[in-house]
Image: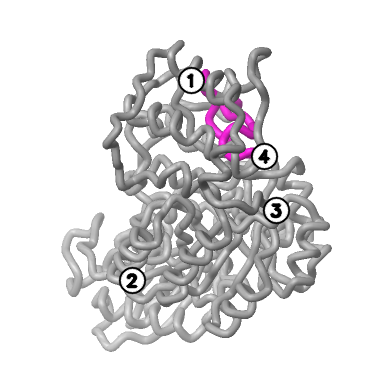
Amino acid sequence: MQLRRRKMCAFCAVRHGRDGAGLSGKEGELLEDGAVHHLHHPIEVSDGLLSVRVTMRLGLGGPSVDTDRLCKSVVPQASGSVDLTEAATIVTQTVNDTSKGPMRTDFCKRLGIEVPIFAFTHCRDVVVEVSRAGGLGVLGAAGFRPEQLEKELQWIDDHVDGRPYGVDVIMPIEYVDADPKALAQMIPEGHKEWLESVMKRYEVPPLPEDYDDARYISADEVSWRPEQSRALLDVAFSHPIKMIVNALGVPPKDLIDRAHEQGVLIGGLCGKPKHAIRQKEAGLDFVIAQGYEAGGHTGEIASMVLTPQVVRAVAPLPVLSAGGIATGQQVAAALALGAQGAWCGSVWLTTKESDVDPLPKRKLIEAESSDTVRTRMLSGKPARMLRSELTDAWEGPDCPGFLPMPLQGMLIHDARVRVMKYEVEPLEFYPTGQVVGMVNEERSVRDVMFEMISDCVDTMEALHGLLDQSQ
């Protein structure tokens, strides 16, 4: 099936106040009589009658997508010409009156967004760009101290132009209830010695005694104790967030109640239908079905199988599909499986706005889909990441084995920071999904969003065309 590739056309550019690329002039100049094709917007002017395919406005200054509806209106200019600004005004008014688009699901309407693309990221710039383009950016709070999270969310508030955004936290159902010092003492010496032997094998120096990089939390803070998550949530709830997501299991009841009291939708990730049912019974507003191919913590069931199972299990609760989504065709597939939206993470790692360090970003860009591995190395729970010689070492015959959460995360933390600081390429890894093999160049978030939206609409149009052919 051949799909059309779309770009921002001159008509969209005029509507968004930009120079009319591809036109002889700029905004306000006249469009000559006759059929004029601005890529995907055929515009015709005849005897004062303007005909143009209606477009949706997606985000503030963001991309536009063809809804394939024909708008006709009499324009006040003399026959033979029409002012582009007038044409744009007519189309914009028509679109605003419809309030519907080919991608705007009921869940989108509840959140006040235009397209069902939800971006999980640890980068505030990505959050802002996705939300401004009509989707919803979700900032991963794990890895931030409360004071750092406050700065990040304040920056988002200052730059997102009032668009909706959310926050993701980690509150595991099961954890070792102890203070950080007691937890550190539970880590076996044999595990520490083995890991240090791997570092010495690759000549990785220790960190300086006074080393303090604001980008990284300490090993103690990797314990993911409830009080740590609650401190982050206190910060999050002090900002105008629209969504809270718990990455590991069902959130505590008081957190669910607090979210509802503040008008914030709350959801959780799941890897099995029975987990989704527990989340529904606990009172969550939506569920994210995260498939086997996803990056980070993930289960054993692929998205193509998991998503429709979860949709049926928790209906009519909204479901977002996660895992293996980086293109418009994959967003369309998620919607076809019954999801109300697509939860994407890996696709943003290689964007220009991403704060991933240059070395791991280069490795991500060069990676193929077969270059990921699902391992307990990072936290003690299965998580997918870019394979490296460090992940291989944890599967070796001399490895003492993985520790339970949070001990594993505390154990690996120092080694991970050392690998990043000293840029030890053979050992460098990064949490990512199998879709990493489809994000092989550095692009802006805006460009990624526009192509995802445009290709999703193209895909749905192509499928609709198959139905027309069969009639």
Of mark 1 and mark 3, the one earlier in the sequence is: 3
For the residue carrying disc 2, how many other residues have a C-alpha within 10 Å: few (<14), some (14-19), or many (20+)?
some
Is 173 within the magenta? no
Instruction: In the rendered structure, find residue 157 and report the number of the disc placed on it.
Output: 2
Task: Please state if 430 lies on the left or on the right of 316 as rendered.
Answer: left
Instruction: In the rendered structure, find residue 18 and report the number of the disc placed on it.
Output: none
Residue 277 image offset from top left, x and y in percent: 80, 64
User: In the image, what residue type sits under mark 3?
Assistant: Glu
> From the viewer's perspective, is the residue at label 2 or at label 3 nearer?
3
Q: Residue at x 53, y 20 (%)?
A: 193
User: Gap between marks 4 and 2, in whole Å?
Assistant: 37 Å
Instruction: Compare residues 1 and 107 and report the one nearer the observer.
Output: 107
User: Gap between marks 1 and 3, in whole Å?
Assistant: 28 Å
User: In the image, what residue type sits under mark 4?
Assistant: Pro
Regarding mark 3 in the picture, which secondary structure is present there? Answer: loop
Residue furthest out toward the top: 201
> From the viewer's perspective, is the residue at label 4 or at label 2 nearer?
4
Query: Which stretch did the figure color magenta?
Result: 370-390
User: Gap between marks 1 and 4, in whole Å?
Assistant: 19 Å
User: Gap between marks 2 and 3, in whole Å?
Assistant: 33 Å
User: In the image, what residue type sits under mark 2?
Assistant: Asp
For the residue carrying disc 1, how many other residues have a C-alpha within 10 Å: few (<14), some (14-19), or many (20+)?
some
Q: Is residue 133 above or below residue 393?
A: below
Of mark 2 and mark 3, the one earlier in the sequence is: 2
Residue at the spot of label 4: 404
Q: Is residue 90 above or below residue 277?
A: below
Of mark 4 and mark 2, the one earlier in the sequence is: 2
Residue at the spot of label 3: 174
Rendered image quadrant of residue 257: bottom right
User: Gap between marks 3 and 4, in whole Å?
Assistant: 10 Å
Regarding mark 1 in the picture, which secondary structure is present there? Answer: helix
